Amino acid sequence: MEAASCSYQFRIALLGDAAVGKTSLLRRYVAGAPRAEEPELEQEPTVGVEFYSRALQLPGLRVKLQLWDTAGQERFRSITRSFYRNMVGVLLVFDVTNRDSFEHIQDWHQEVISTQDPDKVIFLLVGHKSDLSTRCVSTQEAKELAASLGMAFMETSAKNNSNVDLAFDTITTAIQQALQQGNIKLEEGWGGVRLLHRTPNPRSSSRKQHSGPCQC
């Protein structure tokens, strides 16, 4: 199998209250560094849904990630809910310095599983802004909530780039494993996972060789 082939596309959404830092996390992950005019990755509130993408190399597999940044304000919920059923991965994000954003995580989780088969989506709980000392949510209680909801937990900081790549790598690897094990399957009409490139049969590979990456 060609390591450079973009075999699958995974759709992943970030959900959580307004101002927990979902856009900052995505921009840090996609761009790698804040722009000069935004040294602390402060962003305008997301209106509706915004879209980012990044190609990622996994062991033996290259995937394209469609990353969806959703607005946390209540008035945009009718827009963002329509995207849940076509997601295979969801990062549930709260601000460790904002108790309310943590207490609302179960509501966000329930919104997804009320519109999406819970067996078709991988969740990761993310405690953001871990660089701040004025925290209102302990690591232990966040781990306990994640365990009760059947998901992993990770703390991140876009400001100092702590665990940002690791968070996205973790959920992407979990999706890949679920796909390989048959727990998540390709389905016509479902956009959570799409096949972009079908690996050629090794017996026929001598007739046509591909070099270089696919257009992800």
Image (cartoon, rainbow, N blue to C red):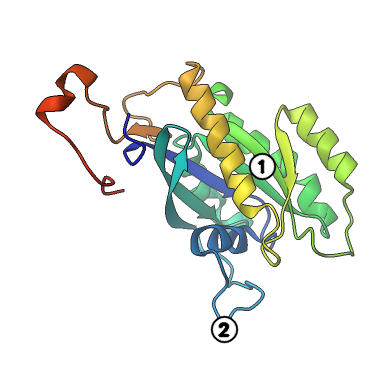
Q: Is residue 216 above or below residue 192?
A: below
Q: Which mark is residue 37?
A: 2
Query: Percent x, y for residue 138?
Result: 89, 48
Q: Which mark is residue 108?
A: 1
Q: Is residue 49 above or below residue 146?
A: below
* Label 2: how many Cα within 10 Å (few below 14, some 14–19, many 20+): few
Q: Disc 1 residue type? A: Trp
In the image, 58 versus 8, the foreground residue is: 58
**In the shown orientation, is residue 216 left or right of residue 85?**
left
In the image, 18 versus 14, the foreground residue is: 14
Q: Disc 2 residue type? A: Glu
- The residue shown at (22%, 43%) is 211
- The residue shown at (59%, 72%) is 43
Query: Percent x, y for residue 84?
Result: 51, 39
In the image, 146 versus 18, the foreground residue is: 146
Q: Is residue 94 above or below residue 35?
A: above
In the image, 199 versus 22, the foreground residue is: 199
Mark 1 falls on what kind of element? Answer: helix
Query: Percent x, y for residue 66?
Result: 43, 47
Label 2 and label 1: CA atoms lie apart by 32 Å
Mark 2 falls on what kind of element? Answer: loop
Q: Quadrant of the N terminus?
A: top left
Q: Quarter of the image holding residue 131?
A: bottom right
**In the shown orientation, is residue 165 left or right of residue 149?**
left
* Label 1: how many Cα within 10 Å (few below 14, some 14–19, many 20+): some
